[in-house]
Amino acid sequence: MVKKNLVIFIVLIFTALQSFSQKSDALNWKFSAENKADGKCVLVFETPIKSGFHLYSPYNPEGASKPLEIKISNTQNYASVGAIKEPVKPTEKYEEIFDVTEKFFEGNAKFTIEITPKNAVKQVVTGRISGQVCNDQYMCSMFDEEFSIEIDPQQPEGEKKKPILNTSPSPNTKTEEPVKADTSQKLDTVVASNNDVDTLQTSETQLEPETTADISSQPVEPQNNGDGLWSIFIIAFLAGLAAIFTPCVFPMIPMTVSFFLKKHSKRDAIIYGVSIIALYTVPVALLIVIANIAGGVDFTAGVFNALSTHWLPNILFFIVFMIFALSFFGMFEITMPSGIINRAENRGNKGEMFGSFFLAIVLVLVSFSCTGPIVGSVLVESASGGNAVKPIVAMFGFSLAFAMPFTLFAFFPGWMKNLPKSGGWLNTVKVVLGFVEFALGFKFLSVADQTYHWHILDREVYLAIWIATSILLGLYLLGKIKLPNDSDVPFIKVPRLILALIAFAFAIYMLPGMWGAPLKALSGYIPPLTTQDFVMGQGNVNQVVAQSTLCEKPLYGEHLRLPHGIDAYFEYNQAVECAKKQNKPLLIVFTGHGCVNCRKMEEYVWSDSQVLATMKEKFVIAALYTDDRTEDISGNSTIGKVNTELQISKYQINAQPYYVILDASQPEKPLIAPQGYNPDPQSFVQYLQNGLNAYLNNAK
């Protein structure tokens, strides 16, 4: 029974880790449709399955692994929607863990759904397909993908219709031969080919644009987000590991493990570890669920968006980080009331059914003076991302790392011999974390500064603070600075020397940024280059220059500007009018001051010579900041609120960065599917090229 519980625990952990993905590397779905003689259509869902993996059937029994689900979203367009059919019978195998016979596919899988359209016209079937794929080592991956399938009931029976693709083709995709078209009133130059994008030529030819459909009501999620769930999970997991090596936690490991060894109960050790995870994760999840019930999902998302942009929470977060840093430096300790700790400890020592749970409470409370600042920092960082799921993921990642040593050492007590002894080095870890807290706290002050244009923490000031902090950290590690609770250091050990070298190297790396070096590795974590007063070779970068490529001076241009000398408008209607006058497509860039991925796109993608030439010469650009607090021209709102409402109302999405290409004469719907974060410059060039081709096609 203990072995079975352990296996289930491991399965749940790995499943939870993998469930943050939207797609699985083990699958490659293809969607199509076939017509039948009676006016019905058959939707076909096919995928090869990676060797060693298996995909669970839609009819996998309850209580087993997650079955496949296919949900059609626009069912109102169909008189009937049939059940999922399996042309090939699945493999059946008894699974001891779940005590059921599971059904799954290996090698390949195919599923069909029969639908009856209400109207015999060409239309698009949309929906989602989700499920679980695993291998024999209990490594599982949850997937959840959107699909769009074009059907035409008037086509002959048996003819297949291909799906509508919501992404641009690969940069290596060959384009078709150009065809003649009258484009004299639109663009006099086009991109020659996918492999030579920056070769611009005067011509009356164009590339055949990709097939597009009415996507104005089909929001396209941004691509893999670096500021997403995986990144916050990894950060939180590392924070949990760091919390273990603090004076409040590390000495408790042998004490706790010896307690479970005396009881000879590995089951209780598992309950203890799971309880730690639950104590950190469940309260945060409950708060978010309650907020969703009380105010709706949009309300919760709005609250987290406000946390990430409004000056008040950002200033409060900054103060909290400073308090945590001072606590780690040894100025004071943040502790829980002793009465609460004693009550939980008494319940745990009674050996009741939930004794392990109460002992977990004791650990959480006793270690609060060390873990509290770390937990608070992780929560604040995750909450500021504007995503209500991130705090849950953050707490799961932190608590998983925090609980692992207590459970693992209970199962493998021999490992205890390899643990280092407690000593002054634990306080050194605590102080180092204090330096990290101090540096990260200025990120929140910087967001408020950029959003409200206070200019008190511009790029060079911010870098100066980080450089000084990094140098002081290096001096501390070398023993040149001594803080309260520090032990005497007769000599410097090799690990401390290496950490000191890293701190000094980081300071040296940032130093050129004081004169305008891009510092791409820190994109999104430091203010953008446009906030810096002086850049070597460019003089005052904030000096207003003539906007020669624009129709008129852009509104809000005194506060806002794009990097790399890109001219842009910052108000939607003004950009639309200029695009009409210049007969150019309109590129809308939904962005934000606090958007990490927006800065990464600007530094890594926009700086590419091909991307830069295409954006500057071929498009009128509207950079719409969704978190800027400048009063708009009406005087009744802010430009951030106006742009956020525009993005949600027109494209049913609130995520940045988000790129939309429009024909200004027909701005109701995008020319091609919008695109989110994509750090590949060639892919972004291809996206811009597809938009140009579609725009030229509208000139026919």
Image (cartoon, rainbow, N blue to C red):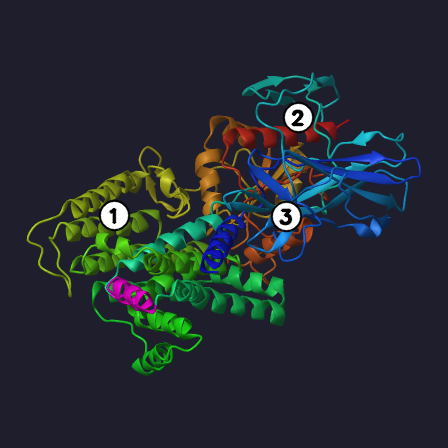
Q: Which residue is mark 1?
A: 467
Q: Circle 2 sits in a helix, a strand or a loop, which is it?
A: loop
Quadrant housing the C terminus: top right
Task: Single out the mark in the foreground, 3 or 2.
Answer: 3
Separation of disc 3 and disc 2 at Cα? 46 Å
- Answer few, some or many: residues within 10 Å of disc 1's Cα (few below 14, many 20 plus, some between 14 and 19): many
Task: Single out the mark in the foreground, 1 or 2.
Answer: 1
Amino acid at dot 2: Leu
Q: Which residue is mark 2?
A: 187
Magenta stretch encompasses residue 260: yes
Q: Which residue is mark 3?
A: 131
Residue 563 visible (yes or no): no
For the residue pair 474 and 427, the one nearer the viewer reads as: 427
Task: Single out the mark in the foreground, 3 or 1.
Answer: 3
For the residue pair 478 and 604, the one nearer the viewer reads as: 478
The disc, 3 or 2, on the residue closer to the chain's N-terminal end is 3
**Magenta-colored segment: predominant secondary structure:** helix
Vertical position of residue 67 compared to residue 36: above or below = below
Residue 683 location (% of width, % of height):
55, 31
Amino acid at dot 3: Gly
Residue 170 location (% of width, % of height):
59, 28
Q: Which residues are magenta?
A: 248-263
Vertical position of residue 237 compared to residue 272: above or below = above
The disc, 3 or 1, on the residue closer to the chain's N-terminal end is 3
Vertical position of residue 363 compared to residue 606: above or below = below
- Answer few, some or many: residues within 10 Å of disc 2's Cα (few below 14, many 20 plus, some between 14 and 19): many
Amino acid at dot 1: Ile
Please state the total of marks drawn on the protein image. Answer: 3
Vertical position of residue 268 compared to residue 223: above or below = below
